[in-house]
Amino acid sequence: MQILDQRNCVLCGMSGNQNLCESCEIHLPRLPDHHCPVCFWPVPTAEICGSCLSNPPAFTRTIAALQYAFPVDALIHSLKYQTNLAIAPILAKLLIDQLNTLTALPDIIIPMPLHPIRLRERSFNQAMEISRYIAKQMQITLLPNICDRIKHTPPQTGLPWKARQKNIRQAFSCTIDLSGKHIALVDDVMTTGATLNELAKVLRKQGASEISNWVIARTLPEINQANPQMLK
């Protein structure tokens, strides 16, 4: 009889053969079935939302695993700020569960780059750790060093929408030829989409034909009634 490695669930602590027990996984905060395929904003039908129609982002689509709410936010926080690298493959697997239905895979995975100052502070890039697992499991080429974050910006958290756009403007560079390539951008959280969109703009200039956002969690704040056409 094969003896399974005993692990504890990262959420409830129950021992078993999984890092996330079935009961806890079932109760993770899910995203709505009906959403914009481009930005993943909730809509009554699975059609492109008005914001993406009137102000199309540089990326083609967004695939997210979960809603950015408890306990997913706590798991991501533990990875990013408590250097709990064992969380990365757990989060990556949750995203892979959503990606397994894809009929066409991207040519390249690019993790969201960190500025060298932020990388020295944190000592690792959480998007890179997540990407590493996804690339290996799905057998997709991982190119973590073809894009650079050349502008050291304050964290986007807490900034209003317009400030986020200004904060991240011209923050990335890329010099490699990506003509005709389908790129998957991997990040932990998508809030307004400003950061992903800014990097996607750079990749478009390098010839990328398709850009998919692959994110662990998508925030779903209240709709800004003052600006319903905002890029979310």
Image (cartoon, rainbow, N blue to C red):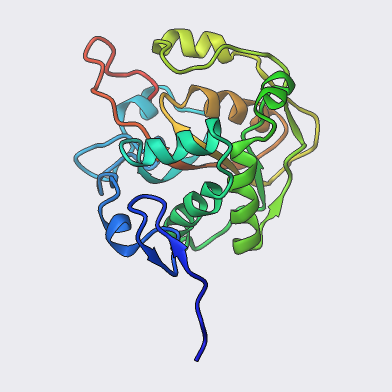
Residue 143 image-quadrant placement: top right
67, 27: nearer the viewer: 27
Q: What percent of the width, then of the height, locates residue 139?
A: 66, 63
Residue located 59% across and 39% down the image:
127
Q: Is residue 186 above or below residue 6?
A: above
Residue 72 image-quadrant placement: top left
The answer to whether residue 144 is left or right of residue 127 is right
Residue located 29% across and 41% down the image:
35
Q: What percent of the width, then of the height, locates residue 38?
A: 41, 38
Q: Quadrant location of the C terminus? A: top left
The answer to whether residue 223 is left or right of residue 210 is left
Q: What percent of the width, then of the height, locates residue 89?
A: 55, 53
Q: Is residue 75 above or below residue 114?
A: below
Q: What percent of the width, then of the height, locates residue 207?
A: 70, 36
Q: Is residue 193 above or below residue 227?
A: below
Tally the marks: 0
Residue located 49% across and 17% down the image:
156
> Which residue is farthest left?
44
Q: Is residue 21 above or below residue 82?
A: below
